[in-house]
Amino acid sequence: MLKNLLVHIPSERSIRPVVDAAISLAVSRGAHLDAVSVGYEITNIGLATDGAAAVAAIFELDRENALARANAALAVFEAEVRNTGIGYGLRPLTGIPAESAATVSAMARLYDLTIVLQPEPDRETFDNTLPQEILFQSGGPVLFIPYIHKGPWEPKHVGIAWDGSRLAARALRDAAPFLTHAQTITVISVNDAEIAADASVAALQTHLTRRGLTARVERMEADRTDIQPTILSVAADAGLDLIAMGGYGHSRLNERILGGVTRGMLQSMTVPTLMSH
């Protein structure tokens, strides 16, 4: 059940894709939707050389500018959500990147789902990094909306990227609210001979059947470097509008280690993707 949603509204990137998707999902489920936006403080204290008062003034001006950026992003969100009839909240934040990541990730732990915008590789901003930090720090499911997405979003054709792992199982459970509303479910299994028998695709189908869900299976073979393109190829052929998958990697602000499939999906996703870590 999705009744308590959080959406991160970037303050330094285009926000329309994630605003449209988050609001339409909340409206369709009658959910409460809280929005958080972070204005990043960037002042270099080395620039201030005229004593404590000057340092304080520079930092205060930086904080005010950061807060203005966060509020401007949230104003766009509020203009779209205020007449929908759903409950919503606004949370403008300021801070340095690492502190902001910890704060927003802690917030996300109490929500059924956090909605974020896919990182955009050509933009130099912490708004690209924060969604990944939420995935690895929050302990909850994160829905990545592609930055090419347009318009409202209500998933009817759902794909499950299944490799039998703990993270895939977590994503399967987190995707339950979408699976119960889906018109079609597709299990995408790449190199399924490597999956343990007790977590096989056949076992997954049995599990879904017991829940009243019918899924068709797409079995593919691919080299490790081709797994992510293979998943997206199946998604395109099947007309999927949501993929659920495990998010592999470790959360380190200064040294990020992402699994190859996760990294590839974050770089090249074509449909909204629910990731669980």
Image (tube, grey):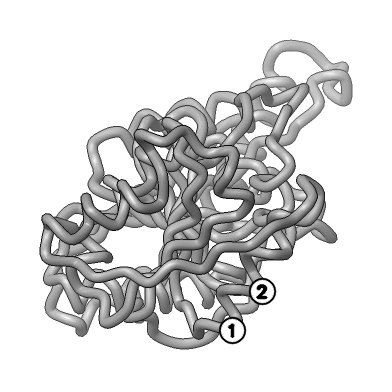
Q: Nearer the viewer, residue 10 or 74?
A: 10
Q: Residues within 10 Å of mark 1 (few under 14, many from 20)?
A: few
Position of 108 with respect to 1 (left or right) is right
Question: 222 and 153: which one is in front?
Answer: 222
Mark 1 and mark 2: Cα distance apart in space: 6 Å
Q: Residue at x 74, y 42 (%)?
A: 260
- Residue 3 sits above or below residue 62 on the image: below
User: Label 2 near label 1: C-beta < 8 Å?
Assistant: yes
x and y, in percent, of residue 107 in the image: 33, 35
Q: Quadrant of the N terminus?
A: bottom left
Q: Residue furthest top?
A: 52
- Residue 176 seen from this side: yes
**Given the image, on which type of amino acid does mark 2 rest?**
Ser
Quarter of image, res 129: top right
Q: Is residue 129 above or below residue 232?
A: above
Q: Nearer the viewer, residue 215 or 32?
A: 215
Q: What residue would you read off at disc 2?
A: 233
Q: How many circles with numbers are drawn on the protein?
A: 2
Residue under the image location 56 percent in, 74 percent down: 235
**What is the secondary structure assignment of the residue under circle 2?**
helix
Q: Quadrant of residue 154?
A: bottom left
Q: Whole-percent x and y of residue 95?
A: 56, 32
* Circle 2 residues within 10 Å: few <14, some 14–19, many ≥20: few
Name the spot of residue 121 as percent of width and height, x first.
80, 57
Residue 110 to residue 27: above or below: above
Q: Of the numbered discs in the image, which one, if any, rests on residue 64?
A: none
Q: Is residue 80 left or right of residue 85?
A: right
Three-letter residue code for mark 1: Asp
Residue 154 can be seen, yes or no: no
Q: Which residue is mark 1?
A: 237
Residue 41: image x %, image y %?
A: 65, 36
Q: Residue at x 41, y 57 (%)?
A: 115
